[in-house]
Image (cartoon, rainbow, N blue to C red):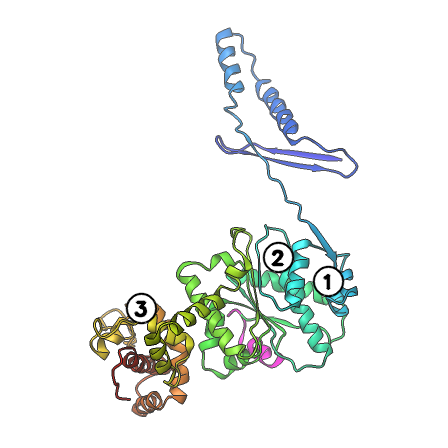
Amino acid sequence: MKALASLDPPRGQPRLLLMFVARGFGSMNVFDLDQALVNDYERFARSFTLIRAPDIQQQVKELYASDRFWPEPLVSINPRFESGDAIDRLVANGTLHSATGSVFRSKPLSLYRHQAQAVAKAATRQSFVVTTGTGSGKSLCFFIPIIDAAVRARAAGEARRTRAVVIYPMNALANSQREEIDKFIKQSGLPDYLRPTFARYTGQESAEERERIREAKPDILLTNFMMLELLMTRQNGLDRAVIANAHGLDYLVLDELHTYRGRQGADVAMLVRRVRDRLCPATAPVCIGTSATMATDVTISHFAGQLGAVDEAIAQTIDNDSVLRHKRDLLLSISGVGETLAGVVLAELPGPDVLRSSAEVVAYAGLNPRQHQSGTSIDRVTRISKIGNAVLRAALYMPAMSAMRYNPAVAALVTRLKSRGRLNRKQIVIAAMRKLLVLCFGVRANLSTRP
């Protein structure tokens, strides 16, 4: 049985041909089909009028012959991806746990070659980027190894914790993927002690749902980069517990990797660094990226490993310069300052020939209070100007949080501010950022700075 449909578009738009050919019929030449449809439609359109004047008939004939009424067809071809190993074979050779096979055995599932390669790389803890086209099953490239890791940990009796964080650019994607994972796991038939768990934490959840997530410690956390940023910086007990559950993170996934570009890309890159520093102090996580629209010349070593490569290049550049190395070591002597902040300060903060006072340093980073203008705010809350170096501000936040507890000078400032009772938590953190920046500037400029 065959079903054919032609959509007649507005003038200048391509025709869309829909063709369904039942199994058992031979192949069909789509261009012959297109021409047959055009001829049939032309005969139908001209059947209503009989033109007797030769000159008019000739002009109408020329108009139809010029394809004025139907532009060239738009033909869409679905790519055929190379086949790889079946799930059962990966279970048989030990690449996947038998329980993982149960999760992905709802129907005979044969992987594409790029999916099998992704599973193999993840098994050896190699980071990678998948840049295949739409409909190529990119999600399975990270969900199969993540679920396999969760199953193996459960079978070994390991303590429950969040082993993977999957970051989506939109909540709709997280919602869709949650439904797909749920389908796979529900049909697996696995006992509760082996069944992987997952949760969405994107800001759509109620207080009760967030509380359950904190207590459950799901194997997989689906979120977006803004919520992950909040989890890393919020100070309430619930959010701190949720992120603490991910200590020792095994997998960090960025879906739709091409969306993180420009300023947003820089923010996400800084977020990834902070996540690795905080949650993976001993062993680096497997970082996975997926995209259907990225250029194919982006290699794994260039993209997936570029964060580590940049850090290494910065460290090497500093090590090769005795002056920078000395300043870096002095910066690291300040409690709360790590390698990342030290590198940012050396790269972004000018010396005393440009900035001549602490006030200028604070203004350069955009951490100085913004002048309140009447009518712009009903709460009259003091805010920072943010007219300055955003890279410095981003790099200072987490070190300042640490310095508030471990740096004597910053801790003393915080104590004084709290005793006044007029500042909220955010304002105190900003004051700590300013203090830490001034301390760093003293070292950066080889000046003595009073604690």
Q: What element carries label 1?
A: loop
Residue at 62% x, 59% y: name it.
Answer: 139
Q: Position of residue 60 (x, y in %)?
A: 51, 15
**Kind of residue at badge 1:** Phe
**Mark in the foreground, 1 or 3:** 3
Residue at 52% x, 29% y: name it.
Answer: 71
438 above or below 133? below
Residue 448 appears in which quarter of the rendering?
A: bottom left
Disc on the earlier residue, 1 or 3? 1
- Structural distance between the alpha carbons of marks 1 and 3: 48 Å
According to the image, label 3 marks what residue? 389
- Residue 335 shows in this picture: yes
Q: What's the magenta region?
A: 202-216
According to the image, label 1 marks what residue? 104
**Kind of residue at badge 3:** Asn
397 left or right, relative to 86: left
Residue at 26% x, 85% y: name it.
Answer: 449
According to the image, label 2 marks what residue? 138
Q: Is mark 3 on a helix, strand or loop?
A: loop
413 left or right, relative to 25: left
- Number of other residues with Cα within 10 Å of mark 3, as a class: few under 14, some 14 to 19, many 20 or more: some
Magenta-drawn stretch contains 292: no
Is the C-beta separation of discs 1 and 3 under 8 Å? no
Tell which of 393 and 57 is nearer to you: 393
Quadrant of image for the N terminus: top right
**Kind of residue at badge 2:** Lys
- Number of other residues with Cα within 10 Å of mark 2, as a class: few under 14, some 14 to 19, many 20 or more: many
- Structural distance between the alpha carbons of marks 2 and 3: 37 Å
Q: Position of residue 399 (x, y in %)?
A: 40, 80
- Structural distance between the alpha carbons of marks 1 and 2: 15 Å
